[in-house]
Image (cartoon, rainbow, N blue to C red):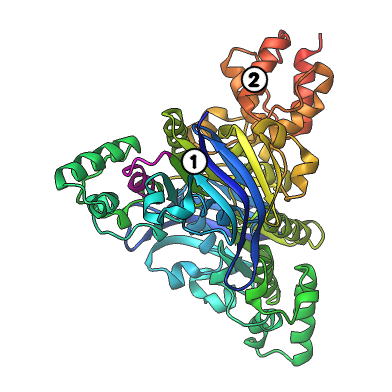
Amino acid sequence: MKAKMMVADEIISVENLSYTYISGNSYALYDINLKIRKGEFVVIMGPSGCGKSTLLYTFNGIIPHLFRGKMSGRVIVDGIDTKQSSISKLSQIVGMVFQNPETQIVASTVIEEVAFGPENLNLSVEEIRSRVEESLAISRLSSKRDFATTSLSGGEKQALAIASVLALRPKVLALDEPTSMLDPAGAALVSSIISELNKKLGMTVVAVDHRVEWAVNVADRLIVMDEGKIVIDDKPSNVFKRFDLVRKIGFRPPQVTELFYKLRDNGVPVNDFPITVDEAEGLVRWVLDD
Amino acid sequence: MTEAIRTEGVEYVYPNGFQALKGIDISIKEGEFVAIMGQNGSGKTTLVKHFNGLLRPTRGKVYVFGEDSAKHTTAELCRIVGYVFQNPDHQIFNSTLLDEVGFGLRNLGFSESEVLERVKIALAKVDLNKNLTDNPHFMSMGERHRVAIASILVLEPKVLVLDEPTTGLDYKRSLELMELVKRINGEGKTVVLVTHDVNLAAQYAQRVVVLKDGQILADGEAKNILSNTELLAKSNLVPPQINFLAKRLRDLNVPENIIKVDEMVEFLQKHVKLTKASK
């Protein structure tokens, strides 16, 4: 098998990618190699400035087409080299949702906002209508189609941002800390929409997110970045086995994992690190059982 | 114990007619570390803005160290109750660190030598080792948060109100900031923390007040409020993950109100013999 060939179920392939912002004097991304398969749910984590948002922005061409900087290597999305394409073409493959929905919403009513993208694709009225209805339903906004966008709660605004991206029928949904500006109710709404898109509709999801307890439950794979590099790329359960590395990078493990890290610090002989409450309960009982 | 803040039947109606507070009675003692939680729109920020006169109650009374706040200007109250905004960029407006942190003192007529001395002390308290001529706008988010806190601390308030202080900070920087706040609390200052973050409240607050629709839904010890799944659900909050484990281990006599990882470590090591080595 040739490494450079795109395997049938790959949707994103990053090859030897390095990137420097025009204002920066060090690499924002350094020699990134990554493949994301169709239907995967990938969460990217790491401290501020580690390059996680920068990496996400290479998936729909914001980098290199919008941000100024120096890029080397390749990003192939659904078989297309992003350098040879444009943001408007790529955004029909990778839909991007940002941290603050306010920065993304342009129209005055919910339905206009969702229709904005497909209208610009010069589709038939029937096609636009069907895409809008479908997107509104997934984002649980059908009953608010005629509402002013300003009247929505924070969570609903983010749901609307997702709906307007879905109306372009992308193959990948990329989200940059989609719940970090929302209150708990809003975060719950958005999280469940994202999960449903992946689990029920099989959409590929790549999210930059700090919420580790959420991530370990929904993600097939965690990518941990530090200083522009991927330092861990593995199943959630394997990521937290590497406690020295996890602690060195300084990102928070799930609380039940931290419990076992600390027990180990205190001389309790533990070799396995749980990530869910179920696993932790089992491990505590097993360690105790005599 | 001295009462730092007391509200009696506080109601607040915004100019657009929205009633954000519907009768709040709360008493905060000097030296307490209180977290105020609740959904967006529950009235958290509206309430704490009454503590230093940024807002005045439509009905009801607010007392600050026993004084009726209605008899004092916001400028006077701000020296006693310092309010740190959620977004440091809403607060920072000067182009040097000295001007920013010394702004309040200069307004109060302090001499330049006093300003300089107190600014240096405040910057040391927040561990900001920068030149006084540095521009705070060009500092990192974590540093800008600390500039904002320093510019409040410099006035030596007795109460520090922090509105979502860790928004936009990653884990390491959130921890650093909260350890700083904990130290300030340890020096005797009263801390009121507005937050959505259950883990943060569990780790640092002794007491939690949950607001819902402008009323107090719950007010009590952090470990009892933050382990109460049914109560928290009313505000779309869930207990910290470690509490779910505590509840699963009831049969081992693990207290159901454990909300911190360290408490669980301590309990397991003290009360159950972790003898068997896992292989």
Q: Residues within 10 Å of mark 2 (few under 14, many from 20)?
A: some
Q: Are marks 1 and 2 on the same chain?
A: yes
The magenta segment? B147-158
Mark 1 vs mark 2: in front: 1
Q: Where is residue A143 shown, x and y percent of the image?
A: 80, 75
Is A290 placed left or right of A116 in the picture? right
Which residue appears at 58% of the width and 30% of the height? A242
Number of residue marks: 2
**SS for tag 1?**
loop
Residue B190 in view here:
yes
| Residue receiving disc 1 | B66
Q: Any mark on residue B137, and which?
A: none
Frontmost residue, B49 versus B170: B49
Residue B239 quadrant: top right
Pointer 1 with pointer 2, Cβ within 8 A: no
Residue A198 quadrant: bottom right
Which residue appears at 67% of the width and 27% of the height? A273
| Residue receiving disc 2 | B265
Q: Is residue B150 magenta?
A: yes
Q: Where is residue A14 shown, x and y percent of the image?
A: 54, 57
Frontmost residue, B125 versus B209: B209
Q: Amino acid at mark 2?
A: Val
